[in-house]
Structure formats: C-alpha cells, structure tokens
Image (cartoon, rainbow, N blue to C red):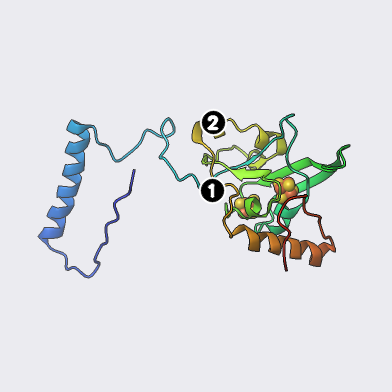
Amino acid sequence: MAATVVTVDRNVKAGVMPILRGHWVTLTAFFKSLFLGRSSTIQYPEENRPVSERYRGIHILTAREDGSPKCVACYMCATVCPAECIFIEAGERPEKTIEKYPTRFEIDLLRCVYCGFCVDACPEEAIIMSRENNLVGTSRADLVIDRDRLMARGELVEHGGGYRPDDHDVRRPVRIAALERLKQEHGIVPGMPEGRETPRS
Ligand code: SF4
Ligand code: SF4
C-alpha cells in the first residue's frame, strides 16, 4: 500500500480552521473504516505490510543441493561488515574445489545495521536477505542467530526473498573493500572461485 506523504507547514497561525481540518481527516478515516472497511491499520502480526523485493530483512544462509552450507568460510562478509557482528569459524571439507565450510557462523542481529554489505561481498551467493524482520527474543542470546537457524528460516517461504546479489555494480566496490581489508589486516589474499569476476584494485 503506497503511503501518502503530507507536508505540514509549521508557520501557519493557530486558529479554528486547522482544528476543523484535523477533525475532518479523523472523521473521514473513521467513517471509511466503519462503512467501507478501508482501514489504515493492519492486523499485525497476522498481517504484514508488503515490502520491496530488495528489502533488507533478517539474513538467510543458502544451501547446496546436498543440504550443506554454500558458504566457503572465506570471511569476506565478516571483514566488510561495518558493525562487526558476523562471527565465523572454518572447518575443512574433503572436496578440493570447496575446501572449507563454516563450523560456526553467527550474526548478532542486535548489532547488525542491515546494510547488505555482507550480501554484496559474498563470492558464493551464500548469504542473502529475507523480507522478514520480526526481531523478537527474550534475551540477547536469542538474537544472536547461528548457522543452523540461518539455514532453516521458514519465514523465507512466507515473506519471500529480499536483497540478494545481482549484476548491479554496487557489489564490486564492496568486494574490493573486503579484499583490501583482508590483505591489510591479515595478509590474506583469498582466491576467487573459477569463472567468477576477478577483483581489480
Ligand atoms: S547487513 Fe551489514 S551490518 Fe548486518 S551483518 Fe551484513 S554487513 Fe554486517
Ligand atoms: S562471504 Fe559468503 S562464502 Fe564467504 S564467509 Fe561470508 S557467507 Fe561464507
């Protein structure tokens, strides 16, 4: 539903007319809701407002066909994350073409600013975002979301996928920044998967 933007002029002198206009708006909304069923509110949480396909909601870790994480534990997302809220520990995989996978992959959603840089930086499309942002928990630990919870997010079906990699040029500078930081801070120069674009400096 498109929102109506009203510009309010604060320099208007107080008087009877602004009060009458305010009542008119209130009464119009009231009668529309009462007789036409056109309410400005929604029955949250049963109903959610539709959001863009590029909405940056809570992350999803994508899986390979065998159900294992697509993530190769390259640390690009954790390196570029401005909130430093991604924690990864890598394990070895037997396949030479994959080599690594995350034994631990956590995102502290209380620190995340939903910028999407992790999605832009990922060379494997292993991390994407959903259109879901019902962030509820009874403790801080509830909102540090781990690998298995990130991979098993049923809300994806209900809300649809959000921001994910595309051919948009915005990804290139984010990935270059991540590679530069990996090189400067850790002396690591990760190899790019075959067939992927090679970052240029
Ligand atoms: S969306 Fe931004 S702040 Fe959140 S985990 Fe990704 S890079 Fe970090
Ligand atoms: S950038 Fe992608 S592949 Fe690399 S650690 Fe993050 S999610 Fe995994």
Q: Is residue 15 above or below residue 56?
A: below
Q: Residue at x 77, y 47 (%)?
A: 88
- Mark sitting on residue 5: none
Answer yes or no: is residue 75 visible.
yes
Going by the numbered disc 2, the residue's amino acid type is Val
Residue 11 place in picture, x, y as percent:
22, 70
Residue 142 place in picture, x, y as percent:
64, 38
Mark 1 / mark 2, whichever is N-terminal: 1
Left or right, 199 with reference to 171: right
Between 146 and 154, the residue placed more toward the observer is: 154
Left or right, 59 with reference to 181: left
Q: Residues within 10 Å of mark 2 (few under 14, many from 20)?
A: few
The span from disc 1 to disc 2 (Cα, nearest Å) is 16 Å
Answer yes or no: is residue 111 visible.
no
The image quarter containing residue 19 is bottom left
Q: Residue at x 17, y 43 (%)?
A: 28
Left or right, 93 with reference to 54: right
Q: Residues within 10 Å of mark 1 (few under 14, many from 20)?
A: many
Q: Quadrant of the N terminus?
A: top left
The image quarter containing residue 99 is top right
Between 74 and 14, the residue placed more toward the observer is: 74
Secondary structure of the residue carrying numbered label 2? helix
Between 4 and 15, the residue placed more toward the observer is: 4
Q: Residue at x 22, y 35 (%)?
A: 33
Going by the numbered disc 1, the residue's amino acid type is Arg
Residue receiving disc 2: 157
Q: Is the CB–ligand 1 distance for label 1 below 8 Å?
A: yes
Outermost left residue = 16
Secondary structure of the residue carrying numbered label 1? loop
Residue receiving disc 1: 56
